[in-house]
Structures are given as structure tokens and as C-alpha cells.
Image (tube, rainbow, N blue to C red):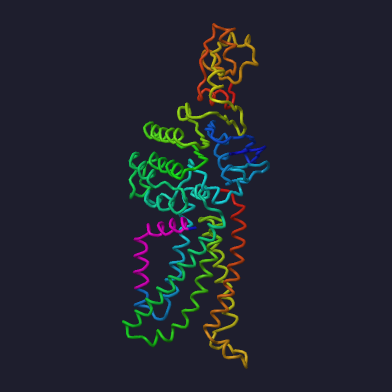
Amino acid sequence: MIEIEYFVKQYRDFSLEISMSIPDGKVVGVIGKNGSGKSTTIKAILGLVKPTSGSVRVLGREARELSPRDKEKIGVALSDSMFSTQLTVEDVIAILRAMYRDFDETFFREMCGKLNLPLKKRMKDFSTGMKAKVKVLSALSHKAALLILDEPTSGLDVEARNEIVRTIRDYAASNRCTILITSHISTDLEGLCDEFYLFSEGKIVLHESEESIANHYGTVQIPFELFDTIDATRISGRRKEMFGYACITNDKEYFEKNQPELKVKPATIDDLIILLGGTEE
Amino acid sequence: MKGLFIKDVRLILTMRQQLIIFLAVCGLIAFTAEGSFVVGYTAALLGILGLSTLGFDEYENGFPFLFSLPVDVRTYVNEKYLLCILLDVAGLISGTVLFFLACLTRGRMAMFQEDIVYVVFYLPATLLLILSILPVQMIFGREKSRIITFVLYGVLFGLSAVLAKIVGPLDKVKSPQNLPEWVSNPFVISAVLCMLVLAVCVILYCICLKVMRNKEF
């Protein structure tokens, strides 16, 4: 579905260098701190930026050459861009109806009702949460084969976030489509994604299935006095804290077996982002 | 393209209050000013309304989402050109109707008959105005394009003023002898001007399309 090969995008003060492959039907989470290159990757997949080198192929075509027909198969919600907020949801419905042959107006209107979105109010008067709901609904409402959701819950309160995450989860459960979702909020992605890519400073520092993360990754609290005695190759990332080092390992069984005195916990996505997304002393 | 049209028409309709004020001003000009100025004014005004939809697209970083919809750059550029041309022509027609109504109610049909021929000049003039601003705005964005257009038109007006000073008043300029009659026919002159404007606009369109295709959003 998406093939990114040796993609490089060079900016004056930032460089993104990645390769990734997203097969059909997978739900893939792209995680990482702000500024790690997630949104640039999304833009590259949508053909909105030109690669400095390498290639990005989507639905079997170069991303910059996607035709309007190809784009009908892609549902997109971007974190910082949407329809003009001068428009109303009713206007958005009219536009989507004209743009997508498979636009499901009934679904869109039903969901607007469920999510309490007023149809005739200008979106400039909407809250951030309401705007986010319109973005996600626009992406979900035309039977897309590929969903690209860039930080769909960024800047939202807990209630709005839960509603959006529930909508995405329901959609993913009832439709066989490929989903690429970026977020720096771990709970949004837990239980939703089949695999994860972790970005840090423009590079992929981890690519694992959810199962592998659950089975092998863990956090270990290591006091300062014990740190030098630990096999450093078992540590993937660490952070200095009051008591010692908070470390992440991709071999938590090793610590459970060989160092039972250390506290080992299963790693959460937040742990991955914090401890792998840029090692801190 | 249909979806883009719907978007732009709905965006224009969000400016209802401004539209009403514009139309009132046009009406005021038609019923108070002498000559056919209102025709050009209405055409230019509606054309500029078409240009304003670009500002809406650009505002709040709208382009990345817009180009993630089933729209390619060529369709987007074509739609903007078509919208501006249609609005300009609609303005020309409604301005002419206003001019006619004003002349009729003011009992100045002679002025209408005398000036109606000059209406044909407003088409190339207003099209040149709108279709030269459009690519500049598309390529450079709303803020930069304001400065560029201001400087560009400042230079053009400056050159015109210098030229006018050199040539002197038009009615005192001697026309070359033995020119065929059709040369002074306003419709022929308008047609020639339209062709020239068309040529300029096609060149600008091609440049605009090329730049937009290479643009990143």
C-alpha cells in the first residue's frame, strides 16, 4: 500500500531519512516527539513535498503523481490543515458529495448527530475538538482504502479525544482498510495498531509489532551503583532520574531471569517515545 | 472541479454582507456617475471576489488538506481561472444592465447609446487586471502578492504617465493617413486587445501551472 525507499528530505535545519513499508490491511502507528518528522512523512506520502532523494510509492504510484481517482481511495485528516473554517458542516457535505463518488452522506450525517456537530454553524466558531471531529469524519466517510490520520487528537481534551479514538476504532473494526496514524499520545494508539514506527530526529529508531513490544520491551529501574554492572547491550535507551536510570530494554526476559532485584515493567508507548526517542543522560 | 466550484461559491456566499455593500456601491455609481465606468467597476469587483477565494484556501494553512482531496494542481489552477473569468463576465453583464437601467431611469438613453460601444473595452481591461493578479497570488501567496502587485501596477502607471507626457493629449495626436476604416472600429480594437490579453494570460497561466506543480505544501 505504501512503500518508502531511502526517502530523504533535507531542510536547512532538519533532515528526514527513512524507509518504511506498510502492507495492505495493516494499522500502523507512527509515534515520536514533536518535530521528529512524522508530519513531513505524511506530507511525503500525500505528495505534498518533493523528496530530496529516494521514492515514495502509494497505491502503486509515485506519491507526487497520484491522480484525483487515486486520491479518492485515500482518507486524510491533517493536524494543522482543514477546510476553510468560514464554511459550515453542511458546506463540507456538499463539497465531499461532489468530490467523492463513494461519499457516504448518511454515515456522515449520522456521525455528526452522534458527535453533536451542528450542521449550519460556521466552523470558525467550533471548538478545537469539534474541528478535529469534522476532519476525522471527512476522512472516514468515503470508503477509503487507505486512511492517513495525522495527530487526529492533538490538542484535545480527554472527552473529545475519547470520542475521536472510539470513532476511529469502530471504523477500523468494521472496515478492512490500511490505516497510518501518527500521534504523540500513547493511549490513542494502544490496542489499535498492529505495528509501530518510532521516529526520532528524522530517523526511524524502532519498528516493531504491537505483540513484540508487549512481549519483549520493558522498562528497568537501575540504581546508579548498579548501572556499571549491567550488560549495556541489553539497554536500548535510558534517562537519568533521582534514584538512578530509567532504562528501556528489548529483552525484558533477560532482566527478569538474571537480575530479579531490578524492577522490570512492560514498556508502554510513552516509555518508547521518552526513552528511545532521543537518549538522555 | 465541481467540488472546488461548490467550495468557492459557498465561500463567496459567506461574504453576503460585503456583497450587498458592493452591489449598493455599484448601484450608487451607476445612478450618479457619468459614462459607463460602472461596467468596468462591477466586472473588476466580481473578478476580485473570485481572487479572494484563493485567500480563503491559503488562510490557516489550508493548502495541504486541499491537495489531499481528489484534486490535482492543474484542476485547481483551471478552476480558479474559470471562476475568475466567469465572475468577470458576470460583472460585465450585470454592470451593463445597471448602466442601462440608470440611463433609462435618468432619461439619458443617448449617453447609453454613445457609451455602450466602449463596454467591450472593459472585458480585456478587467480580465488583464484579474488574470495578472491571479498567478502572482497563487505563486507568492496573499501577503507577498499584495506587495508585488502594488509595485507592478505602480511601475505600469508610472510608465503610462511618462508615455502620456511624451505623446501629449490623445485628441491632438495625428493619426497616420489612409488607414482603413475598420482600424478605428471599437469592436475590432477590443478583439485585438482581447487577443493580446489572452496571449499574456496564457503565458502567465503556463508559468503559474509550472510553478504550482513544483510547489510544496
- Res A154 visible: no
Residue A264, percent across and down? Answer: 53, 13
Residue A227, percent across and down? Answer: 60, 11
Q: In the rendered image, which quarter is residue B213 located in?
A: bottom right
Q: Residue furthest bottom?
A: B178
The foreground one among B153 and B97 is B97
Q: Residue at the location (40% across, 33% down)?
A: A166
- Res B21 visible: yes
The foreground one among A180 and B188 is A180
Magenta-colored stretch includes residue A20? no
Give the overall secondary structure of the magenta segment. helix
Magenta residues (range): B2-27
Q: Is residue B105 above or below residue A5?
A: below
Q: Disc count in the image?
A: 0
Residue A210, percent across and down? Answer: 53, 25
Q: In the rendered image, which quarter is residue B207 located in?
A: bottom right
Residue A226, percent across and down? Answer: 59, 8
Q: Is residue A223 left or right of residue B101?
A: right
Q: In the rendered image, which quarter is residue A112 located in?
A: top left
Q: Residue at the location (50% across, 31% down)?
A: A184
Q: Is residue A87 above or below residue A21?
A: below
Magenta-colored stretch includes residue B7? yes
